[in-house]
Image: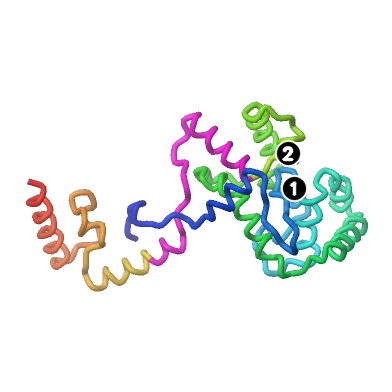
Amino acid sequence: MATVPDRFIREKEVDYSSELLSALGCGLVTNEKRLKPLSLGVMSLLEILDNKCLKGDKNATWFDFGSIFYINDKRQEAVEAVADYSRGLTSPLEKAVANYIKKENITILSMPVIDKEIAQAFTGFDMLPKTGDSSGAFLFGADSVASIVHTCCSKLNATKEEVIWETPLTLIGHIVAVNAISNGVKGIGRRKDVEHLKSIFAKCKKWDEEEKLYPWQWLEPQFYPLEAYQNSKAIKRDYDKRLKEVKKCQN
């Protein structure tokens, strides 16, 4: 497989205006109502419910959908109902969510707004390098909540409750990323567009069949030598020729 230089891969698309507004406390609008940006506590409660909308599951139910709106609005008031639900007493929360959906006239047409709200809540966390550690049942379990509270309470001069329930998760993610940078963690930055990378790999396969140099090898052959599998006489000849041309221009 080709080694594609980072600068040839587009960054993952981010709505920077919405991201900034979310970090500043301004959520998206649906049904003429402005949502609150998702918070750490809200995400933890939704994880306890195993909310399918968080995973982009197409089999999400009305309860998955409605509970996001309800819990994001009620926040700390919803903790006991979620606790009861997790222990098998499901009817109080289901009834509360159903009544909320009806009262606020929430329909499935609002789903794209929720999808976007969830996505931008993670833009800061997405900048962190992947560790490969998938231990723990929840992304925002007790260990993560404790770590975030430990970092953000001091950085924001805020209380535990303010960090968990009032601070936009978008802002928290970026604070965690900035704190990691200040602690010397490497590899922090905007993620690359995976779909764009896949399209480049598909083009590389075509270029391999045609025995052509990759664009980065043609532009800067002195930095991007041939891959081990690029061993045909034709491509070696083209590479050597291009390398000579570039070196000649540099002299």
Label 2 to label 1: alpha-carbon separation: 8 Å
Q: Which amino acid does label 1 sit on?
A: Val
Q: Which residue is drawn at 69% across and 59% down?
A: 29
Q: What residue type is labelled 2?
A: Ile
> What SS does tag 2 mark?
helix
* Residue 164 marker: 2
Marks 2,1: beta carbons within 8 A: no
Assign the magenta stretch its main secondary structure.
helix
Q: Is residue 95 magenta?
A: no
Q: Which residue is drawn at 18% across and 50% down?
A: 222
Of 235 and 81, nearer the camera is: 81
Q: Residue furthest front?
A: 32
Q: How crowded is mark 2: few (under 14 residues within 10 Å), some or many (20 or more)?
A: many
Residue 210 shown left or right of residue 249 in the figure: right
What percent of the width, then of the height, locates residue 58?
68, 69
Residue 178 shown left or right of residue 212 in the figure: right
* Residue 162 marker: none
State whether residue 25 is above or below residue 227.
above
Q: How crowded is mark 1: few (under 14 residues within 10 Å), some or many (20 or more)?
A: many
Q: Start and end of the magenta stretch?
A: 170-199
Q: Residue at x 22, y 57 (%)?
A: 217
* Residue 42 marker: 1
What percent of the width, then of the height, locates residue 193?
46, 58
State whether residue 119 is above or below residue 134.
below
> What SS does tag 1 mark?
helix
What percent of the width, then of the height, locates residue 180?
52, 34
Q: Quadrant of the N terminus?
A: bottom left
State whether residue 199 is above or below residue 41.
below
Of 248 and 167, nearer the camera is: 167
